[in-house]
Amino acid sequence: MNTAVDRLFLDNASNRHLDWLESEAIHIMREVAAECSNPALLFSGGKDSVVLLRIAEKAFRPGKFPFPLVHIDTGHNFQEVIEFRDRRAAELGERLVVRSVEDSIRRGTVRLRNPQTDSRNAAQAVTLLETIEEFKFDACIGGARRDEEKARAKERIFSFRDEFGQWNPKAQRPELWDLYNTRVHPGENMRVFPISNWTELDVWQYIAREKLALPPIYFAHEREVIPRNGLLVPLTDLTPAHEGETVEKQIVRFRTVGDISCTCPVASDAATVAAIIAETAVTQITERGATRMDDQTSEASMEKRKKEGYF
């Protein structure tokens, strides 16, 4: 094949692959709407939840979404992401429910040694469970993917949570032939992952194909960072430099977006979606492995948080 024909073949193959993933995700989203009485879609403003919004548009437009958008705000999120979250929800004309870890701290249901500086990432689980109880959600749709982390690779697409909001990886329901058991008793709920079978590269190729907008911190920009334990910690009031550490200005981008206290950028000059796709295609480190401080405490840290109710 010559270069042009070869590129056309690869583009067609990639589009067929994305078509299949999109079709599966639409089917899952519609299954949630049909089988669950009061679902919600978790929307943080991150790239995976942006993809979920496009899937929901294709599944339900021109009608309204059959569920609200929900975000559990740690109070330590990147401002660019929060602004994008609010703007995107307004553009879609969909209801956005925001609940705050800060409110859980005031109620005393979340206790941190230093509420102003300690990571609130794991504490999101408490606020999420309180929100599920408040609105009686029986299913929460999220953008977790199996390629992100070992514990997430154990998840079913319809992942059962008991009446305490806890996840037991040894008691998951079989999903043979894409048949999903959505039955829950009062107080129990499902976490549903329509893009579970997608990879980071699939997400970026879909963003490119659908021309989806994202928060600017996903693209290369200059930022002050602190080299620490193989990561580039962003310099902020929440993540200051320790004694003896150096602060550097580097060109970086974020592969994943979460709580400031535990999310790090990576060195990169990829300033466009096409450049990010090229970079992602050759990387050998998962996005959470390269960017999340909270996943480095132990190999089982994510699984422990998930068992306690973390998404």
Image: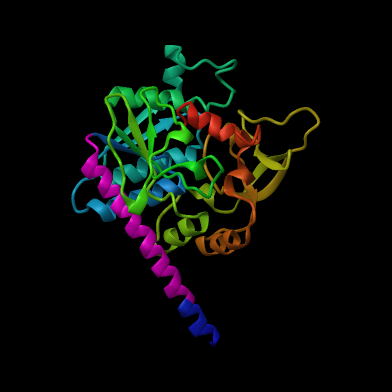
Residue 96 placement: quadrant: top left
Residue at x-position 61% and y-position 28%? 238
Looking at the image, residue 135 sits to the left or right of residue 143; the answer is left
- Dominant SS of magenta comes to helix
Q: Is residue 42 visible in the rendered structure shown here?
A: no
180 or 143: nearer the eye? Answer: 180
Looking at the image, residue 294 sits to the left or right of residue 155; the answer is right
263 or 202: nearer the eye? Answer: 202
**The C terminus - image quarter:** top left
Residue at x-position 20% and y-position 46%? 64
Looking at the image, residue 303 sits to the left or right of residue 58; the answer is right
Is residue 119 positioned above or below 25 on the image?
Answer: above
The spot of residue 136 in percent (x, y) is 27, 26
The spot of residue 262 in percent (x, y) is 59, 34
Residue at x-position 39% and y-position 41%? 142
Is residue 20 positioned above or below 286 on the image?
Answer: below
Task: Read off the magenta span.
Answer: 10-37
Q: Is residue 286 visible in the rendered structure shown here?
A: yes
